[in-house]
Amino acid sequence: MAELLTDSRAVALLAAEACDDRKAVDIRLIRVEEVSSLADWFVICSGLTDVQVRAIARSVEDRLETELQRLPLRREGQTEGRWVLLDYGELIVHVLTPGERTYYDLESFWGHGEQERYISPLAGPAL
């Protein structure tokens, strides 16, 4: 487990898995450590409703606290629920409604970072 604490990609994958647990849509991981001093990784995903956005954020918080004993350094947007930001230092998680995600277009803004889609291990093979 100590290895997980130092591997920022593993923390990002754990957060993405927690997003997937609450049926988040279009989960993306963006490696920004070489292009920004804000964080090493962003996890960006969508929730279809304000309630789902808050549930996804809560799932991330619960998973990282339970498995890594980590709490976010900063948390924004939970009251409104259209965009929740969880800042863990090396990882920033953005959970947005589809409208907010389109408007802010973080994937394009951080397009110079290495991006990958999160594929759920429970997803069956493509037909």
Image (cartoon, rainbow, N blue to C red):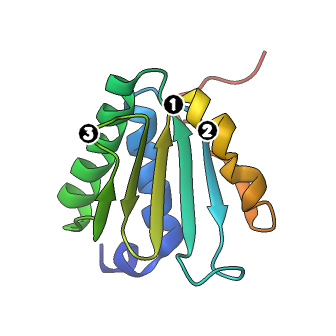
| Residue 99 % position (x, y) | 60, 28
The quarter of the image holding the C terminus is top right
Q: Nearer the viewer, mark 3 or mark 2?
A: 3
Rate crowding at label 1 as few (under 14), some (14 to 19) or many (20 or more) other CA atoms within 10 Å.
Answer: many
Label drawn at residue 97: 1
For this view, does 63 lie left or right of residue 88?
A: left
Question: Do the CB atoms of the residues marked 3 and 2 lie less than 8 Å apart?
Answer: no
Q: Is residue 59 left or right of residue 94?
A: left
Q: Are marks 1 and 2 in contact (CB under 8 Å)?
A: yes
Q: Residue drawn 56% across and 75% down?
A: 40
* Label 2 SS: helix
Location of mark 2 (residue): 101
Disc 3 target residue: 79
Residue drawn at x 56%, y 48% is 44
Q: Gap in Å between the C-alphas at discs 3 and 2? A: 17 Å
In what quadrant of the picture does the N terminus appear?
Answer: bottom left
Q: Indicate the quadrant where residue 30 lies.
A: bottom right
Going by the image, does 28 lie left or right of 23? right
Circle 3: residue type? Thr
Choose mark 1 or mark 3, whichever is in front. 3
In space, the residues marked 1 and 3 are separated at their CA atoms by 14 Å
Whole-angstrom CA distance, mark 1 to mark 2, is 6 Å
